[in-house]
Image (spheres, rainbow, N blue to C red):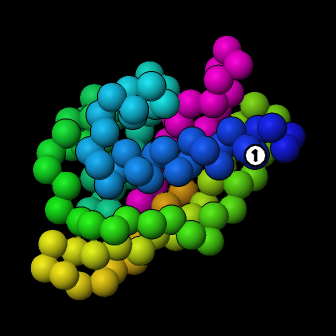
Amino acid sequence: MSKDIEELTVLNRDYVASVQNGDVKRFNEILAPEFYCTNPDKSLVDRAGFLKQTAEPVTIRNLLEHDVKIRVMGDFAIIHGATSYTTADGKQASGRYTDCWAKQNGRWLAVSAHVSR
């Protein structure tokens, strides 16, 4: 299980960095075809919608994850985390996220995300 925790730790950092950097290419590699995300505005987007919103200009800076908890249950994992960041107008802000991952063909892929701010 420690190998899975190590892999998921790296994937979690990649996921957060991809949000900060608008990295559609990396998300294309780590999102499952059936991925869905609940956004802070309560909208639900599928994989294509998520990639489209990721391609939009990023308005936050200094996005960091902390208080990360990774739970592995066989070929399924849940990652809970907190974020801190700077808004476009320079204010400090924070949020939380829950990402669900499934091991498919030996690879961990994100299947679901829920973000709150």
| Residue occupying the point 19% across, 55% down | 58
Measured along the vertical axis of the image, is residue 88 above or below residue 25?
A: below
Residue 109: x %, y % from top left: 56, 30
Residue 77: x %, y % from top left: 69, 43
Q: Quadrant of the C terminus?
A: bottom left
- Most extreme residue toward the bottom is 91
Residue 96 visible in the picture: no
- Most extreme residue toward the right is 1
| Residue occupying the point 41% across, 74% down | 84
Q: Say how many tags the image has.
A: 1
Q: Quadrant of residue 67?
A: bottom right
Q: Is residue 25 magenta?
A: no
Q: What amino acid is labelled 1 in the image? A: Ile
Horizontal side of residue 75 vs 43, given as left or right:
right
The magenta region covers 101-117
Horizontal side of residue 61 vs 114, given as left or right:
left
Residue annotated with mark 1 = 5
Q: Is residue 107 magenta?
A: yes
Residue 22: x %, y % from top left: 26, 45
10 Å crowding of disc 1: few (<14), some (14-19), many (20+):
some
Magenta stretch prevailing secondary structure: strand
Residue 50: x %, y % from top left: 29, 39
The foreground one among 11 and 51 is: 11
Q: Quadrant of the N terminus?
A: top right
| Residue occupying the point 52% across, 35% down | 111
SS at mark 1 in the image: helix
Measured along the vertical axis of the image, is residue 46 above or below residue 81?
A: above
Horizontal side of residue 45 vs 11, given as left or right:
left
Measured along the vertical axis of the image, is residue 110 above or below residue 94?
A: above
Q: Quadrant of residue 100?
A: top right
| Residue occupying the point 75% across, 46% down | 5
